[in-house]
């Protein structure tokens, strides 16, 4: 069975280099009673998820205790597309390539409506592509993805 009450808070990781956009998405998500962690770059998001590119720096990565991510379980990632350093697309690819995190639904946001970019993100595994400014009706579309992400996470855990 699933753990916790049905209305347990979902934890969304929001990634955007713009402070204004971050505050906006944070406010929208919180008003839908999501728990939000906001970071300002793709690499900070990976750090938070415990996915930093350790291989490059350290040939012997320290083993992560099995319950390491329990307290900061992320149920969905919503990320801006255009960010310095690592784009939302690159972040999406890293998540989808990761064995331990590829069940987390990823949603991409962008202020530019570029169909080729949107299609590329969706082909790479993004659940949704929102145009900014993100609205309340966009946030409402997240719920089914959150539910699905949680279910596939439960399945992964019990295999």
Image (cartoon, rainbow, N blue to C red):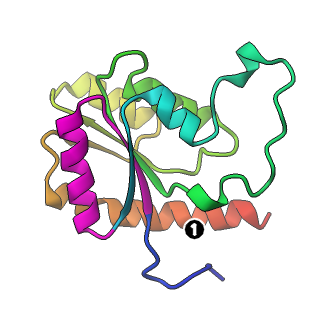
Per the image, the residue denoted by label 1 is 151
Please state the horizontal and vertical placement of residue 19, each as a whole percent of the image.
23, 35
Q: Is residue 50 left or right of residue 66?
A: left
Q: Nearer the viewer, residue 116 or 65?
A: 65
Q: Nearer the viewer, residue 26 or 103?
A: 26
Mark 1 element type: helix
Work out which quarter of the rendered image holds the C terminus and state it: bottom right
Q: Residue at x 35, y 16 (%)?
A: 84
Q: Quadrant of residue 140?
A: bottom left
Q: Is residue 49 left or right of residue 148?
A: right
Q: Residue at x 79, y 43 (%)?
A: 64
Please state the horizontal and vertical placement of residue 8, each as a whole percent of the image.
47, 77
- Is 2 included in the stretch rendered in magenta? no
- Is 14 included in the stretch rendered in magenta? yes
Work out which quarter of the rendered image holds the N terminus and state it: bottom right
Q: Residue at x 43, y 20 (%)?
A: 86
Please state the horizontal and vertical placement of residue 47, each as a whole percent of the image.
57, 34
Give, as a single range, the part of the protein colored magenta: 11-33
């Amino acid at each position: 069975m699933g753990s916790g009450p049905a209305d347990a808070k979902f934890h969304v990781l929001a990634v955007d280099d713009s402070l204004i956009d971050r505050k906006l998405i944070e406010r929208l998500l919180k008003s839908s009673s999501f728990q939000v962690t906001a970071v300002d770059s793709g690499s900070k998001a990976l750090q938070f998820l415990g996915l930093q590119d350790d291989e490059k720096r350290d040939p012997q990565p320290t083993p992560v205790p099995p319950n390491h991510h329990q307290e900061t379980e992320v149920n969905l990632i919503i990320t801006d597309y255009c960010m310095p350093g690592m784009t939302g697309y690159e972040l999406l690819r890293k998540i989808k390539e990761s064995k331990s995190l590829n069940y987390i639904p990823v949603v991409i946001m962008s202020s530019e409506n570029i169909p080729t970019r949107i299609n590329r993100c969706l082909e790479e595994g993004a659940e949704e592509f929102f145009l900014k400014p993100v609205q309340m009706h966009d946030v409402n579309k997240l719920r089914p993805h959150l539910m699905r992400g949680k279910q596939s996470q439960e399945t992964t855990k019990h295999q």
